[in-house]
Image: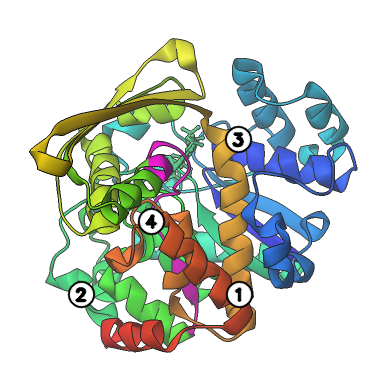
Amino acid sequence: MAGIWLIGAYGAVSTTTMTGIAAIKTGAAPRVQVGMVTEAPECDPIRSKFPLEEIAVGGHEVRFLDRNAYQASEKIWEENVHFQRSYLDKGKNELSKIKAKKGTAINCGPGVDALGELDTLEGEGLTLSEIISRIMKDYESFKNKNGEVCVINAASTEPHIPLTEAHQSLDTFEGLIDENQTEMVTASMLYAYAAFKQKIPYGNFTPSHGATVPAIRELAVKQKMPYMGDDGKTGETLMKTTLAPMFKMRNLKILGWAGFNILGDDDGVTLSKDANKASKIESKDKAISSSIGYSPFSITEIKYFPPLVDHKVAWDYISYRGFLGTKMALQFTWHGIDSILAAPIAIDIARSLMFAKSRGEFGAIHELAFFFKHPIDDIIGNTFIQYELYNNWINEGRTVELKKMQAKIVK
Ligand SMILES: NC(=O)c1ccc[n+]([C@@H]2O[C@H](COP(=O)([O-])OP(=O)(O)OC[C@H]3O[C@@H](n4cnc5c(N)ncnc54)[C@H](O)[C@@H]3O)[C@@H](O)[C@H]2O)c1
């Protein structure tokens, strides 16, 4: 038995994750799924340890708390029609039993406010310590029912707040919490902190702060919990970090890379606000330089385009120089359905982190960089190297080099 706890439980990524698992459990969808890395034969140690039909799902939300997961999933499905309706119908019993718990939206910025009326723990007048206790209780009862569990942050992207001295050590961070300094923390920090307190691994599917704050990383190591982030690599950035190494291998010089993304769902609403969008652009931008080792001129733009709903279109123009200094260009258009690409990767991350925990591994699991746009510590952007690292890790455990690097980062 195992479980995935989704922050942002009624969003597009989370409801697609929940519906997918329910459809597989009920036999409506085929047991063997494409699009999910951990279902490939190379990942057998992971998939056999955490079979999809034994994974329970739950989560936190700040909207629509009167709904159950079936109602929430149906709403997203009606807007997108992104898979066969029968998966939802056959999973109805399973999904109707899942109800999101009330979460926190502290300092989630104008992008989250724009989603409509929020129902939050701080709205009940709770202090930071009380909010953390409530979140920990929710995690605890999920863990007691389901054994090994993992928290995945799939909530709307938050703006980054400045990190101060007080964020650098666990001691001073806990001081902020005790003094209820609400302006110094964001929701994703509280969810990550509470996960480690409950000895639960944490994966950050978003570019929000989450477990990247030094004080929270210190707690993860103290509690011997694995974590990884940031921001699921599913679409345009996957293309960037796969194509950019090709230019490097052929010694073609990339002069500039312009990427224009349009998307239309709630993620698009959130990212249409500058403060929330800045976190996402930072994580997309770093992908090229971390793949090729230098930073060409770059434009990354994200615009809200409602008719697309959960579909995403990206147009990328790459200017490069070859033999005799001649300039050439490559253009591509990416068309994906965000949550169909993202949901299986969220499951991959959760399964991999639970696997890491089962082997006693803790701290940032850099070998999972393959799944992220902006892997923690800027580890490696190149998709091919990431894939090799991931596969070696599954079969051989942590490599000496990465262990050394981790020791340096932790202390
Ligand atoms: N391919 C992808 O879809 C993809 C790829 C990488 C990253 N992401 C990131 O994953 C996240 C989810 O994407 P989505 O398309 O499902 O977005 P979405 O807007 O459909 O869903 C986000 C959900 O989070 C909820 N929420 C917001 N703040 C919360 C909080 N503090 N606590 C609990 N719930 C909260 C919202 O109410 C909403 O239901 C976004 O941050 C997105 O940038 C998505």
Question: Which residue was labeled with disc 4?
Answer: 230
Q: Mark 3 near mark 4, Cβ–Cβ under 8 Å?
A: no
Viewer-side label of 1, 4: 1
Q: Nearer the viewer, residue 38 or 64?
A: 38
Task: Please indicate, yes or no, whether residue 132 appears anywhere in the rendered image.
Answer: no
- Name the side, left or right, on which 89 lies relative to 304: right
**Residue type at the position of mark 2:** Gln
> Which of disc 3 and disc 2 is earlier in sequence?
2
**Residue type at the position of mark 3:** Ile
Neighbor class of circle 3 (other Cα within 10 Å; few <14, some 14-19, many 20+) is: many
Q: Quadrant of the N terminus?
A: bottom right
Which structural element holds mark 4?
loop
Question: Which residue was labeled with disc 1?
Answer: 394
Which structural element holds mark 1?
helix
Neighbor class of circle 2 (other Cα within 10 Å; few <14, some 14-19, many 20+) is: some
The image shows residue 76, relative to residue 44, as above or below, that is: above
Question: Which residue was labeled with disc 3?
Answer: 340
Spatial distance from mark 2 to mark 3, Cα to Cα? 37 Å
> Which of disc 2 and disc 4 is earlier in sequence?
2
Residue 62 position, x and y percent, is 49, 39
Which residue is painted at 56% across and 39% down in the image?
341
**Residue type at the position of mark 1:** Ile
Viewer-side label of 4, 2: 4
